[in-house]
Amino acid sequence: MTATLSKQELLTSTLTSLRGAMPELRGALVATVDGLPIAQAMGEGTDANRVAAMAATALGLGKRINDTLGSGQLTDMSVGGAQGQVYIYAAGNKGVLAVVAPTGVNLGLLHMEARDAAQSVASIL
């Protein structure tokens, strides 16, 4: 008999795989486009509710910017600071993937891994 994993377990597994592929990441979170956290692998002390709400808001703003500029469908965006960066990936029409990375992370590897994870999230949702 095979056990069927819930969506929650599948999403958590996706985040675990992403963090396993890039252990230097500080966190990763899946949220709905409405800003509700679904699954998270964030550092201790991080408020997943706030991060989910901000990631969804940023995704919405990014989509509006792309629409205004005629840049096509938004795939990802980033917000950088002196101590690290947050990369936000569209996960289909229902989800958003937020990844917290340290400064100097290998961007090619990050985008490859995170875009694959975002596609997985989209198919799960």
Image (cartoon, rainbow, N blue to C red):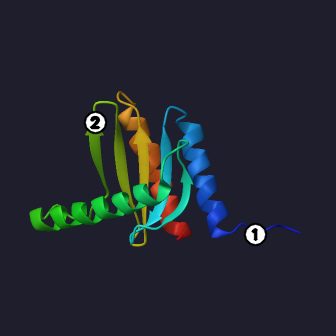
Percent from the top left, x then y, of residue 90? 37, 61
The N terminus sits in image quarter: bottom right
In this rendering, position of residue 15 left or right of residue 111: right
Label 1: which secondary element: loop
In this rendering, position of residue 56 left or right of residue 61: right
Q: Are marks 1 and 2 in contact (CB under 8 Å)?
A: no
Q: Residue at x 45, y 48 (%)?
A: 114
Percent from the top left, x then y, of residue 102? 40, 32
Percent from the top left, x then y, of residue 101? 41, 37
Task: Judge whether 17 appears above or below 34 on screen.
Answer: above
Mark number displayed over residue 4: 1
What residue would you read off at disc 2? 81
Say few, some or many: other residues with alpha carbon within 10 Å of mark 2 (under 14 / 14 to 19 / 20 or more): few
Percent from the top left, x then y, of residue 98? 42, 52
Q: Residue at x 36, y 58 (%)?
A: 55
Q: Residue furthest right?
A: 1
Which one is nearer the viewer's eye here, 30 or 109?
30
Say few, some or many: other residues with alpha carbon within 10 Å of mark 1 (under 14 / 14 to 19 / 20 or more): few
Q: Residue at x 12, y 65 (%)?
A: 70
Label 2: which secondary element: strand
| Earlier residue among tags 1 and 2 | 1
Q: How far, Cα to Cα, is label 1 from label 2?
A: 41 Å
Task: Judge whether 8 appears above or below 100 on screen.
Answer: below
Q: Amino acid at mark 1?
A: Thr
Task: Judge whether 83 appears above or below 35 on screen.
Answer: above
Q: Residue at x 10, y 62 (%)?
A: 69
Task: Judge whether 93 appears above or below 44 on screen.
Answer: below
Q: Amino acid at mark 2?
A: Gly
In this rendering, position of residue 72 left or right of residue 53: left
Q: Residue furthest left?
A: 69
